Image (cartoon, rainbow, N blue to C red):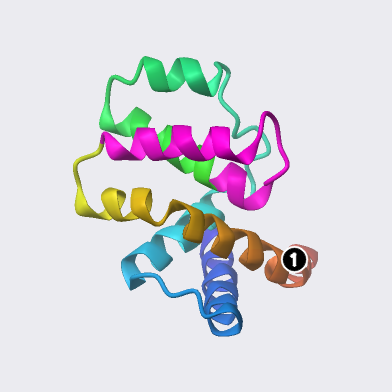
Amino acid sequence: MQDAYVQVFADCVAHTRLQTGIELPKHIEHYVVALLAHHIDRPDFLPKQTFAELVLTLDSKRNAKYIGDTCLFLVGVFPGYGVNRRYYSDIGRTAYSTIELEMFQTIVHSFDTIQTLIDRTVNSAHSSLVQLRDVD
């Protein structure tokens, strides 16, 4: 089912890009598609600890990616959740900034644009995902 979600989100992201004019490097766009497809069937994606505790105790790139991805997904899909969007955006940026790879540095600098793309994509993807789930 993961492949089907990837295809739906790839189509929706492309549609959102055309509708909004939001342009991101292709590898970042692919990352967004993978992030959305990965989280779609995970209702328990929130960490057990607080985000602040997690970012203060970062001990690996893997944990940094997990925190960054979770925050990016959260602010894009559930912008009204919890404390406020700025809190989660700042924590996500901080986590990603510890990963010294160009892709994650691009995500840090484009975090707000990416979260807007996710928000708009999720809104446009809703009917496509409902149809996909009904087939299963």
Identify the residue at image location x=65%, y=35%: 84
Residue 12: name its quadrant: bottom right
Q: Main secondary structure of the magenta part?
A: helix
Kindly give the residue lying farthest to the bottom in the view shown: 18
- Asked if residue 43 lies in the magenta stretch, the reply is no
In this view, the residue in front, 41 or 18, is 18
Measured from the top left, where is residue 8 in percent x and y?
60, 71
Q: Which residue is mark 1?
A: 126
In this view, the residue in front, 125 or 113, is 113
Q: Is residue 109 left or right of residue 122?
A: left
Q: Which residues are magenta?
A: 73-98
Compared with residue 52, is residue 111 higher up or lower down, i.e. above or below?
below
Residue 44: name its quadrant: top right
In the rendered image, the quadrant that contains the N terminus is bottom right
Measured from the top left, where is residue 95 in percent x and y?
37, 33
Compared with residue 51, is residue 37 higher up or lower down, i.e. above or below?
below
Q: Is residue 67 left or right of residue 41?
A: left
Measured from the top left, where is residue 128 in percent x and y?
72, 72
Measured from the top left, where is residue 73 in percent x and y?
56, 47
Compared with residue 113, is residue 93 higher up or lower down, i.e. above or below?
above
Compared with residue 4, is residue 104 higher up or lower down, i.e. above or below?
above
In the rendered image, the quadrant that contains the C terminus is bottom right
Q: Is residue 64 left or right of residue 80?
A: left
Element carrying mark 1:
helix
Identify the residue at image location x=52%, y=80%: 21
Identify the residue at image location x=43%, y=75%: 23
- Asked if residue 88 lies in the magenta stretch, the reply is yes
